[in-house]
Image (cartoon, rainbow, N blue to C red):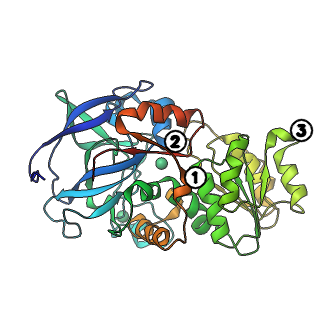
Amino acid sequence: MMDTAGQVIRCKAAVAWAPNMPLAIEEIEVAPPQANEVRIKIVATGVCHTDLYYLFESKREEGFPAVLGHEGAGIVESVGPGVAEFQPGDKVIPLPISQCGECRFCMSPKSNLCEKGWFSGYDGLMSTPESRFTCKGKKVLQFMETSTFSEYTVINKNAVAKIDPAAPLDKVFVLGCGVCTGYGAAINTAKVEPGSSCAVFGLGAVGLAAVMGCQAAGAGRIIAVDINPKRFEKAKVLGATDLVNPEDHDRPISQVLADMTNGGVDYSIECTGDVEVMRSALESCVKGWGVSVIVGCTDMHDFAARPIQLIAGRTWKGSLLGGYKLKVGVPDLVTAYLDKKVKLDEFITHHMTLDQVNSAIELMKLGQCIRTVMSVSPQ
Ligand code: ZN
Ligand code: CU
């Protein structure tokens, strides 16, 4: 292998030149890592709904051109000054939320919203002005600090987790966003209790991971809700005890669930990003103590609910990246996978290469995949 440390790397990346356009496979230049940065060879990546959201919904012109992708795994190629924690050859997962370990939010056990990451001061733009990418003489922005749709990327050390060298990168990459988001929403945010009843709305990767999280927490009943019955099979494998398609019923889903659970579930987890579903999920909780967690991402619409729902004792919460402090949470979940305590293989339904990224995006838009793994660089 050629020693590329300290040099600009020319490599392949999928560039989003503008909103609503197919990504273009381009040769880009990736600058060497600066102080406290790590340059990573991306081996595997998946498409997550947030990539689609950025490209097709939020459509902020000033956020382009950009390299999307934030759910990936790779190998450290080189490190910048001041990085002792990583060495070339380390297996790593980029983190969509950093963990500096020093800010107010990192110091509190109550939150994972590190102040040093892109989410701090969030104004709807998910890319940051800092970028090590150029293409055809233009600066190309990084997305969610990570940009995994590239053979190489440069990330602040606070937003990289070192994982077990035994981990298969083409499997554990799903912990970079989707699976840890859903799993943590059940475990960390809802804090599902043994024997409780749960409902999960939306059975994409995040929802399926929430089902798995409910099961790991010992829930007695896990009701999986989706209008796409093709997803029920996977939900069952991951722990769902009941499968409900709202289209099979001519009354509100909250009433259906209330009838099934003697007045409502203890916990509901919303994984669709649809504000109407968020309301249904809240209304599906039992009065007195029901907890509803919003996970599905949207920043485009307001939601509504009757205050009496909360006055009657329900709690409405949200969760980003499953509430995990990711530098610790992601490696722990990788270990749990290697110990066969967490399932990941079940989430991967399609295999492609980075060149096929637009097909992978299309599959996700049509709801035909859970996760497509794209090979990026050879290991
Ligand atoms: Zn921090
Ligand atoms: Cu994501």
Q: Work out whether mark 2 precedes mark 1 in sequence or the reverse, and give the earlier one.
A: 2
- Judge by depth and name the residue closer to the eye, 22 or 371: 371
Q: Quadrant of residue 312?
A: bottom right
Q: Are marks 2 and 1 in contact (CB under 8 Å)?
A: yes
Q: Are marks 1 and 3 in contact (CB under 8 Å)?
A: no
- Give residue 3's position: percent from left, percent from top: 9, 53
Q: State whether residue 95 appears in this view.
A: no
Kind of residue at disc 2: His
Separation of disc 2 and disc 1 at Cα? 10 Å
How would you rate the neighbour count of disc 1 (Cα within 10 Å): few for under 14, some for 14-19, many for 20 or more?
Answer: many
Mark 2 highlights which residue? 49
- Give residue 236's position: percent from left, percent from top: 70, 57
Q: Which mark is residue 206?
A: 1
How would you rate the neighbour count of disc 3 (Cα within 10 Å): few for under 14, some for 14-19, many for 20 or more?
Answer: few
Q: Is mark 2 within 8 Å of ligand 2?
A: yes
Q: Which mark is residue 250?
A: 3
